[in-house]
Image: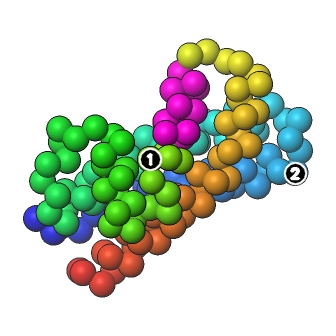
Amino acid sequence: MNEQLDLTNFKKAIKSLKKALDEYAKDTSNEFVRDSCIQRFEYCYDSSKKMLSRHLKNIGEDDIDGMPLADIIRLGAKKELLLHSWDKWVIYKDSRNATSHGYNESVAIEIVQQTPIFLAELEGFYEKLEAYYETEF
């Protein structure tokens, strides 16, 4: 397959999450910024899953469509696209699911506290994608 993937929106999403987290670090009592971090986490999580699947298909992993998310993540880690495998990504998945079930301040705080680890995951993944698509095309 090997087609160029547009990484523009993924990069913008990561930068947006980083900016929100930087603001939150200045004042962790600011619930508006905390909520912004969570919303940006949600978007980045969803985007990263899609980008990983697209890239894996692009490099010849044709069986991705029917594969469970855990296996897709494990494959991404095996191919050294991700910093962590399912052991960490299941935490991100559970956090993403928790954001869909109404607002709970203690859950929100917990999610935001782990989001910098997720941000590092995203930045590492983006760097791998960027390097691949710069050299391949």
Mark yes or no: residue 16 visible: no
Q: Which segment did they paint magenta?
A: 90-100
Please say whether residue 109 is one of the residues in the magenta stretch.
no
Q: In the displayed orientation, state which residue is furthest to the top.
A: 102
- Position of 64 with respect to 130 (left or right) is left
User: In the figure, is residue 66 to the left or right of 108?
Assistant: left
Q: Residue 97: say if magenta.
A: yes
Residue nearest the observer in this picture, 81 or 112? 81
Residue 24 position (above or below residue 29): below
Between 8 and 117, the one nearer to me in the picture: 117
In the depicted view, which residue is nearer to us: 92 or 136?
A: 92
Q: Main secondary structure of the magenta part?
A: helix
Q: Is residue 36 left or right of residue 32?
A: left
The N terminus lies in which quarter of the figure? bottom left
Question: What kind of element bears circle 2?
Answer: helix
Q: Identify which amino acid the numbered label 1 is placed on.
A: Trp
Q: Is residue 75 left or right of residue 17?
A: left
Residue 63, image x and y in percent?
Answer: 14, 48
Q: Pointer 1: what residue?
A: 86
Element type at mark 1: helix
* Residue 132 visible in the snapshot: yes
Q: Earlier in the sequence, mark 1 or mark 2?
A: 2
From this view, report whether residue 109 is shown above or below residue 131.
Answer: above
Q: Nearer the viewer, residue 124 or 41?
A: 124
**At which x and y percent is residue 128?**
41, 71
CA neighbours of label 2 inside 10 A, class few (<14), some (14 to 19), many (20+)? few
Q: Residue at x 24, y 81 (%)?
A: 136
Residue 94 appears at what percent x and percent y? 53, 31
Q: Quadrant of residue 133?
A: bottom left
Residue carrying label 2: 26
Disc 1/disc 2 C-alpha distance (Å): 31 Å
